[in-house]
Image: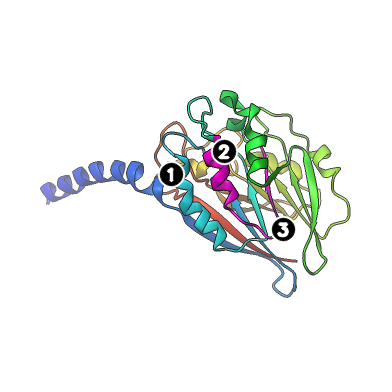
Amino acid sequence: MFKKILLFVLVLIVLVPVYAFKVEPFMVHTNNISLGDNQKKTQLKLVQISDIQVSKAYESNRLDKVIDKVNEQKPDVIVFTGDLFDNYSKYSHESEIIAKLSAMKAKIGKYAVWGNHDYGGGAARVYEYVMNQSGFTVLKNTGQTIATDSGKKIFIGGLDDSLLGNPSVNQTLAYRQKYDYSILLTHEPDVADQFVNTNTQLALAGHSHGGQIWIPFKPITNVLARKYVRGMYTLSDGMKLYVNTGLGTTSLHARFNVVPEVTAFSIKF
């Protein structure tokens, strides 16, 4: 019995790193979430992606699978919650990235916010250009109101990065006027507490990578992603916060029990 247990442990020691480095990072899971009142007729299909972290470990051709996952949802809106680059000074490939992100199609619009890695390594010089060329409107303490086919109005606001930028919730909300549903984007999830009692229905964030290496009962957390790490949260005023686990990796280019994610929201309001 002892030999069997020892053999099992040795197999795990070998297989778990292989899986974490060579299998799970190459997977993409679509997480479908329904929000709002099912009795309502207006529906918005919104797809969130986050933390692509393009690098030598996550080259731009890896996005082909993501493009398919996004487009099969036929989204009205696509949002990107930051960290396009991992380290721009070591891996840029702007033209390839533009081609990939441009292939993601949305009926109404595509929106993005800054992540901390989009400022570092010289990325600040090109991030907005790359996203704009890819069809994304970059929101930096700004917002836009969009209309659905039924005439309902949705506000989408985006906060500047909370680590290396100059975020302002008040400045972002100043763009909000008449609306039926309000969505705020931020890279770092823990700042969503600042959105409480602002009549915001949904906040979307990334940054945490969901821990990237998920150890049960002792998750790995990141600055400004210690309170809200992954998945759906309901804050004190009823606002929903969703923390996307991202697509790429950083530092240690492995994932365990945190499959790369595309999130598809069906919102009725």
Q: Dot 3: within a 10 Å radius of its alpha carbon, few (fewer than 14), some, or many (20 or more) residues?
A: some
Q: Which residue occupies the foreground of this view, 199 or 267?
A: 267
What residue did someone put label 2 on?
A: 84
The kind of secondary structure element at disc 2 is loop
In magenta stretch: residue 136? no
The kind of secondary structure element at disc 1 is loop
Q: Quadrant of residue 38?
A: bottom right
Going from N to C along the chain, the mark reached first, 3 or 2, is: 2
In contact (CB < 8 Å): disc 1 and disc 3: no
Q: Residue at x 24, y 41 (%)?
A: 13
Amino acid marked by disc 2: Leu
Q: What range of the chain is rendered magenta?
A: 94-114
Going from N to C along the chain, the mark reached first, 2 or 1, is: 2
The image shows a total of numbered marks equal to 3
x and y percentages locating residue 111 in the rendered image: 69, 47
In magenta stretch: residue 110? yes
- State which quarter of the image contains the C terminus: bottom right
Q: Residue at x 16, y 45 (%)?
A: 6
Q: CA distance from mark 2 to mark 1?
A: 22 Å
Q: Dot 2: within a 10 Å radius of its alpha carbon, few (fewer than 14), some, or many (20 or more) residues?
A: many
Going from N to C along the chain, the mark reached first, 1 or 3, is: 3
Q: Which residue occupies the foreground of this view, 17 or 131?
A: 131
Amino acid marked by disc 3: Ile
What residue did someone put label 1 on?
A: 214
